[in-house]
Image (cartoon, rainbow, N blue to C red):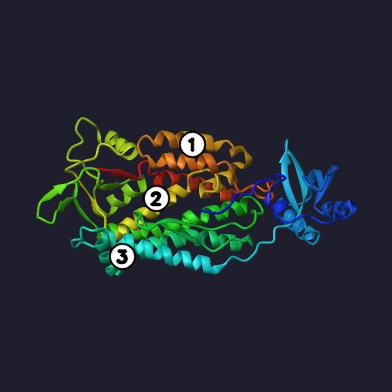
Amino acid sequence: MEGEPFVDRPSSIILQKVAMLNSPDPEILNSIVRRVFRADSITIGDNKRFIVRYVGSLLEDSEQAYERLAADLDSFNITPLFRKEDGTEVIYLMPGVVRPKPSRLSINIGLFILTLISVLFAGVMYSYDAPLPEDTLGIIKTLTLNLWRGWPFAVSLLAILSAHEFGHYFAGRHHRTAVSLPYFIPFPLGLLGTMGAFINMKERPRNKRVLFDIGITGPLAGLVVAIPVLIIGLALSQVGPIQNTTYVTSDGAQYTSAEDDLLEGNSLLYLGLKYAVKGKLLPEPVSYGVKSPLEYWLGFIFIGRPIPFGGEDIQLHPVAMAGWAGILVTFLNLVPTGQLDGGHILYSVFGRRVRYAWQIILILLLVMGLFWNGWFIWAALIFLLGRAYAEPLDLITELDPRRKALAMLMLVVFILVLTPVPFTVF
């Protein structure tokens, strides 16, 4: 996941951060632009919306032309924008150049340490199998003393998240785009102990190819780690009956509590890996009843019902839990809107045509929220933040065939990791 959006309008980050003090002679700018562009018309701006606007056609490959023009204009503190308007190539010269400032590494390190502790607490909750005290302070003390037991979950989950974020980071560095190191987000006492991590793009990507590479490398790198982690975790897990947890009170009485257990959501990838490791589709009901197996699985995947009480399912080992969480994180990041990885990929493929895609995503999330309430929160976030995409400086350069093929691959990956009901409480 990346940081703040960049938008091409007068209040953009370029104009906010850097004001151009003195405009160079337009003829000097014209001579520089003519090296890469044949201008059929030239419009002088007011230095607020733009300095000069050129309409015409490029004389060389758009990616090379942008690199050359940006380098030539840098000393004038001017940023070029490449656009297509009504099928015609247009260049805008904008006042100011973003000069990214170094990040404070201490913040990254501090957040990682806090996240590590938080994830260890989550891990020990999955690993600790001895009786716990009945008072809250006693529980916290016991878990703290046994914090080391959470390392299999913590190492597995943080390895997946780190691979994901450093995939973005190294792609940004490869393309000479200023990006921050990952910021991890601790979530104490949460189910996973973290809300993930993100990097911050400190400047707009040069073109769609750069945006695509930064967006796609995170999910791919995360899956490269998550899949083997999940396979190892499933091999360490046992298969057992689905039933509510039994509690024992201080006087020895036993009871079960409805709505106190969680059943993890299923994706096609998760189902396939469980079948590959355990030889059966899980959770396996006692009987499919009047439904066919296909009807049962379609219903169970998309609405999480009916819960197959008495049937069998994976009793997740902490490592398997981390691997499953890595698949879920990949899916959430591939939701195709806004500043999510899926939004970057979608914009790279379709450009400004995706500006209204968030409305379709919003409706789908509201429908999915009928079966898992968490989607209502996602819908609210997308309503507030999902309209802004990371728009590149150069919108003329399109994706090459190799990247278009990778985009199709990511569509397949998105379908495989799609988890409509991440959790079912029973």
Q: Position of residue 233 (x, y in %)?
A: 30, 59
User: Mark 3 vs mark 2: which is more N-terminal?
Assistant: 3
Q: Which amino acid type corresponds to the residue marked 3 in the rendered image? A: Gly
Residue 410 against residue 222 in the figure, above or below: above
Q: Which amino acid type corresponds to the residue marked 1 in the rendered image? A: Leu
Question: For the residues marked 3 and 2, what is the alpha-carbon distance in whole angstroms?
Answer: 20 Å
Residue 263 in view in this figure: yes
User: Mark 2 vs mark 1: which is more N-terminal?
Assistant: 2
Residue 156 in view in this figure: no
345 to the left or right of 92: left
Picture disc at residue 328: 2
Q: Position of residue 307 (x, y in %)?
A: 24, 40
28 to the left or right of 232: right
Label 3 crowd bin: few (<14), some (14–19), many (20+), radius 10 Å: many
Label 2 crowd bin: few (<14), some (14–19), many (20+), radius 10 Å: many
- Which residue is more in the foreground, 269 or 94? 94
Q: Quadrant of residue 171?
A: bottom right
Picture disc at residue 362: 1
Label 1 crowd bin: few (<14), some (14–19), many (20+), radius 10 Å: many
User: Which residue is pictured at 59% across the width and 45% down the height?
Assistant: 389
Residue 398 against residue 134 in the figure, above or below: above
User: Mark 1 vs mark 3: which is more N-terminal?
Assistant: 3
- Which residue is more in the foreground, 360 or 351? 360
* Helix, strand or loop at mark 2: helix
Q: Position of residue 237 (x, y in %)?
A: 24, 57
User: Which residue is pictured at 38% across the width and 60% down the height?
Assistant: 157
Question: For the residues marked 1 and 3, what is the alpha-carbon distance in whole angstroms?
Answer: 37 Å
Quarter of the figure that contains the C terminus? top left
**Residue at image mark 3:** 150
* Helix, strand or loop at mark 1: helix
Question: For the residues marked 2 and 1, what is the alpha-carbon distance in whole angstroms?
Answer: 19 Å
10 to the left or right of 155: right
